[in-house]
Amino acid sequence: MTSVSFLDEARELLREFPVVDGHNDLPYALREQVRYDLAARDIAVPQNAHLHTDLPRLREGGVGAQYWSVYVRSDLPDAVPATLEQIDCVRQLLARYPADLAPALTAADMEAARAEGRIASLMGAEGGHSIANSLGTLRGLYALGVRYMTLTHNDNNDWADSATDEPRAGGLTAFGRAVVREMNRLGMLVDLSHVAVTTMRDALDATSAPVIFSHSSSRAVCDHPRNIPDDVLERLPGNGGVAMVTFVPKFVLQAAVDWTAAADENLRSHGFHHLDTGEEAMKLHRAFEERNPRPVATVATVADHLDHMREVAGIDHLGIGGDYDGTAFTPDGLNDVSGYPNLVAELLERGWSPSDLAKLTWQNAVRVLGAAEDVARALQATRGPSNATIEELDG
């Protein structure tokens, strides 16, 4: 149990260097629960019964910047309008809570929000299916404020392999590499969470800007395909990128991997998608858990990942991406967005210095977005938008 003094020190540190969290699925939870009726889930007041996220708990957790995921499922017949609805949801949140949430497009915007005591709000698209194989659509998402795109979600798309699907492209296709290059030209971060290891390596070969992993942990610590192998972590110093550790128990605790596979199959056997967090699906989940007690991850579990990732990639290449409201379960002590001080306190107790922790929570994530902006300025001076098509490049 972390001592009170470490927890006090953690909270003090977070007042100066708050958390930049790489991935929160609140917009999708609002879509699923109340079809974007923000009055029905007023996050100005505690929403503990329904959500991991609300403004009081973001404040309690020391969050200073949040990438809101504008995720939509990859099996939708037309993902683009659904993605636009997700973007609209974030914009509605910004309009409804201007005293707390500050729109942010750049690293400078993030610093300005911190100076104002507001939470910088950025957007990340989770899955290349959201551009429907169109570089014009990619540019449209950037123009609407999206500042990273995860190349895949749980399924392959036409130009990139996912970590949790059967290999098809062998990594990135020629069009996939063109997507990465156009993201570099725009200043949109290439996010390698969810992608196959072959895709990670291909993207690192193709990119001229730093990459991120918005919510992934260490495969050496927990052998799950959603995590990052050491040989890829070793490339981050040369690339300048940032791996943002996630809290999802089935990605951080080895004992939870098998349990989750059985729990997912239980949902599917009853006609639910295995990622469904609606009331009926959660009722089934809870009944399954009563029969099969769930292995419990803790703050220390996540800290073990960070210890290892620091050894392999270095302190300049780490961040945090909790995946709140995108997972049914969370670790003890990291139950919701108020829990970040517990992780910082655990790391202090393990000997991490305040300067290390400032990099982890704030500085690395701000730096990587600024670096992507610098690359984009240089590229835009030498080339214009690409109008390449998947038919042209992949046949």
Image (tube, rainbow, N blue to C red):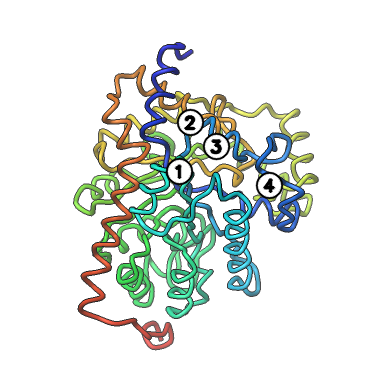
Residue 315: x and y in percent read 26, 36
Q: Nearer the viewer, mark 1 or mark 3?
A: 3
* Residue carrying label 3: 58
- For badge 3, the amino acid type reads Leu
Q: CA distance from mark 2 to mark 1?
A: 10 Å
The residue that appears at 43% across and 52% down in the rendered structure is: 193
Residue type beneath disc 2 = Tyr
Q: How many marks?
A: 4
Quadrant in the picture for residue 382:
bottom left
Where the C terminus falls, by quadrant? bottom left
* Residue at the disc numbered 4: 265
Name the residue tied to disc 2: 340
User: Mark 1 = which residue?
Assistant: 21
- Nearer to us of marks 3 and 4 is 3
Of callouts 2 and 3, the N-terminal one: 3
- The part of the image, by quadrant, that contains residue 58 is top right
In the rendered image, which quarter is residue 285 located in?
top right
Q: Secondary structure at mark 2?
A: helix
Q: Which residue type does callout 1 highlight? A: Asp
Q: CA distance from mark 4 to mark 1?
A: 30 Å
Is there CB contact under 8 Å for labels 2 and 1? yes
Residue 116 as seen in the image, left or right of residue 324: left
Residue 109: x, y in percent?
Answer: 38, 53
- CA separation in Å, label 2 and label 3: 9 Å
Callout 4: 10 Å neighbours few (<14), some, many (20+)?
some
Packing grade of label 3 (10 A; few <14, some 14-19, many >=20) is many
Q: Earlier in the sequence, mark 2 or mark 1?
A: 1
Label 1 secondary element: strand
Indicate whether 287 appears above or below 165. above
Left or right side of 27 for 191: left
Q: Residue at x 25, y 33 (%)?
A: 311
